[in-house]
Every structure is written in C-alpha cells, then in structure tokens.
Image (cartoon, rainbow, N blue to C red):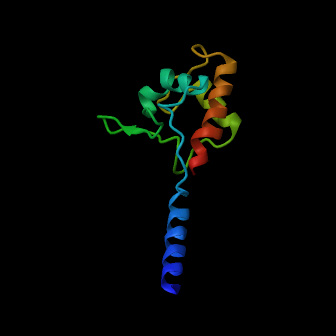
Amino acid sequence: MKVYKLLILLLFVIFFFACFDRTPTRYSITDSKTYEASLFRQNCAICHGPEGEGKMLDDGRVIPNIRGGQHKYTTDQQIYDHIANGGNGMVPFRGILTDREIKQLVQFVQRDLRKDK
C-alpha cells in the first residue's frame, strides 16, 4: 500500500511540474499586433531581420542584433538619436517617421526587444 501511495505522489509531482513551463516566452515581433511592432516590420526589419536579430550582408557588413549581445546605444536618448539621425550605415528616419513614432520605437526596443537579455 505504501508503494502505491508513493507512486501516486510521484505521478502527481511529475504532472504538477509538467504543467508549468518555466521557459520564458520570447517576444515575437512577427506575431505582435502592436503599432510599434508594425513600425518595426515596415521600417527596421528589412535590415535588422524580422525578429531584430541582425544579419551579415553579402559585402561582409554586419547589421547589428538589437535583441541580444552588447549594444552600442543603450540609453533612450542614444537610441532615439540613432534612429532619427542614422549613421554607421543606418539611414536617418527623421524625415520618414514622426517624432512620436521614433519615441515609440525607442520604447519598443527597450521594453520588448531587450527584455530578453
């Protein structure tokens, strides 16, 4: 009888832990319905990739991964300035996006993309 109780307890514990997936869910730009994700898909994904992971171009230049690794621009202001003014191979978006849209992209990068650090 003790063996059965232990077996039932063991099965319960296994079932209990199997119900909880402890793997953090990664934010998906492709699946997101937010306006910021839409802005990213329309303006940034062509270079940074559909999930912001960057890529290497045929000529050897590297488009940065904005989700992980070390980031050259870390503050909101630095990210804003880079999106607005471009540089280091990136085109400026000041004339393409509104000030509000650039700020939304900054928050999107900081809040949603870099939380996977």
* Residue at 52% across, 40% down: 66
Q: Nearer the viewer, residue 78 or 98?
A: 98
Counting labels gives 0
User: Is 75 located above or below residue 95 in the figure?
Assistant: below
- Tell whether 60 sits left or right of 44: left
**Percent position (x, y) of residue 84?**
62, 24
Q: Is residue 96 above or below residue 11?
A: above
Is residue 103 something that shows in the picture?
yes
In the rendered image, the residue lying farthest to the front is: 1
Considering every residue shown, the one lying at the far bottom of the view is 2
In this rendering, is residue 6 above or below 65?
A: below
Percent position of residue 109, x then y: 60, 36
Nearest the viewer among 77 and 15 is: 15
Q: Is residue 62 visible?
A: no
Q: Residue at x 46, y 36 (%)?
A: 51
Q: Residue furthest left?
A: 58
Side (left or right) of 46 relative to 66: left
Q: Position of residue 27 (x, y in %)?
A: 54, 40
| Residue at x-position 53% and y-position 57% | 19
Q: Position of residue 5 (x, y in %)?
A: 53, 79
